[in-house]
Image: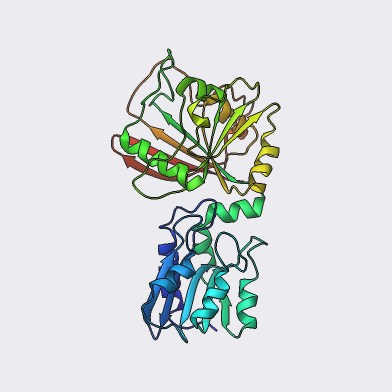
């Protein structure tokens, strides 16, 4: 049964769920209320850390007997890196749990039924669409059985990623580069081709002034020309070195099976083109700098289209100013 303030408290849970950088885990928020007063609230901050329900229980300074917990995703019912949230809720004494979205992960699902069997009133589906939007990457991956793939490029006004001599660092300013690091952390995995490793020798790690898990680094090197001494193979994060035949759809399935829910394709132009050609880019993020580079390399090379109808299907999402640069985001409409 729904109560008059249920929507209010679930909106609060959804809002705080967005604070974490949780890949490959879901974004989850939890607010625990009794008699119109918030007793505790929490969110899942990062993979391996306390889940939202546990954080909310720990943040409560009073007993929770008879309270209602508002949770944006069905409480997990299994032991992974942390224990089951269902058991934490039962031990806390809450009498009612309101859930926005059922958990699509078969390993973690079943929490609602476990709570009901223990005598807790459970309501599922409140503000499900809003909660799902805040948790898009995780839900997309479990629905499609592959990671959600974002392609990113830092480009000039004339669509170039480098000067004719190959120089590319740095086209965009510090604010845009910092935002790009946040995007790496959100996706949980970052991918480049061999050419980018040879040209830039990147580490592909996240450097932010907050605690985050380092993304998994994926390098496509079909001819196995990299030596292993490049910075991307250092010990600061896991690296997946893909050699031999590159079958992108099959690889995407494999990455999901390894637990990845998002992949950020950073380059170069040939690598981005391969993902676009396979129609495996779900989100496109372009950082545009107020520079004109002339006849340098474009951000997507040799992508052949023979009919204008093949160029449609992208929906504008948002635009943000980052210093003197602009970030444009688009979604693939399927």
Q: Is residue 221 visible?
A: yes
Q: Nearer the viewer, residue 311 or 179?
A: 179
Counting from the top left corner in percent of width and height, residue 62 is at 38, 82
In front here: 290 or 313? 290
Residue visible at 50% across and 31% down in the picture: 232
- Name the spot of residue 168 as percent of width and height, x first: 40, 22
Q: Is residue 249 above or below residue 167?
A: below
* In the image, farthest residue toward the left: 323
Q: Residue at x 33, y 34 (%)?
A: 325
**Residue 171 image position (x, y, % from top left):** 36, 26
Q: Residue at x 39, y 50 (%)?
A: 211
Q: Relative to 119, is 247 on the left or the right?
A: right
Q: Nearer the viewer, residue 268 or 209?
A: 209
Instruction: Give residue 120's position: percent from left, percent from top.
Output: 57, 83
The vertical placement of 315 against 108, above or below, is above
Quarter of the picture containing the N terminus is bottom right
Q: Is residue 125 visible?
A: no
Asked if 187 appears above or below 107 in the picture, the reply is: above
């Amino acid at each position: 049964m729904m109560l008059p303030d249920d929507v209010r408290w679930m909106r609060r849970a959804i809002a705080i769920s967005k604070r974490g950088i949780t890949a490959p885990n879901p974004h989850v928020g939890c607010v625990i209320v009794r008699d119109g007063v918030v007793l505790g609230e929490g969110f899942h901050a990062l993979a391996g850390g306390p889940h939202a329900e546990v954080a909310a229980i720990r943040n409560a300074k009073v007993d929770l007997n008879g309270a209602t917990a508002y949770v944006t995703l069905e409480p997990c019912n299994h032991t992974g890196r942390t224990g089951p949230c269902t058991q934490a809720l039962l031990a806390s004494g809450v009498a009612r749990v309101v859930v926005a979205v059922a958990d699509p992960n078969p390993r973690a699902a079943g929490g609602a039924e476990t709570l009901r069997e223990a005598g807790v009133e459970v309501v599922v589906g409140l503000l499900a669409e809003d909660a799902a939007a805040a948790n898009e990457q995780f839900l997309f991956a479990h629905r499609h059985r592959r990671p959600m793939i974002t392609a990113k490029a830092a480009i000039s006004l004339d669509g170039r990623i480098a000067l004719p001599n190959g120089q590319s660092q740095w086209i965009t300013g510090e604010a845009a580069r910092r935002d790009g690091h946040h995007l790496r952390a959100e996706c949980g995995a970052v991918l480049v081709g061999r050419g980018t490793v040879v040209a830039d020798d990147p580490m592909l790690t996240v450097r932010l002034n907050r605690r985050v898990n380092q993304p998994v680094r994926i390098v496509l090197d079909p001819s196995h020309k990299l030596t292993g001494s490049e910075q991307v193979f250092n010990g600061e994060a896991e690296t997946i070195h893909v050699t031999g035949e590159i079958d992108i759809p099959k690889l995407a399935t494999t990455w999901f099976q390894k637990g990845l829910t998002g992949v950020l394709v950073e380059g170069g132009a040939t690598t981005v083109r391969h993902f676009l050609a396979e129609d495996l880019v779900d989100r496109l993020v372009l950082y545009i700098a107020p520079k004109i580079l002339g006849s340098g390399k474009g951000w997507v090379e040799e992508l052949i289209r023979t009919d204008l109808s093949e160029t449609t299907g992208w929906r504008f999402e948002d635009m943000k100013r980052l210093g003197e640069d602009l970030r444009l985001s688009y979604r693939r409409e399927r």
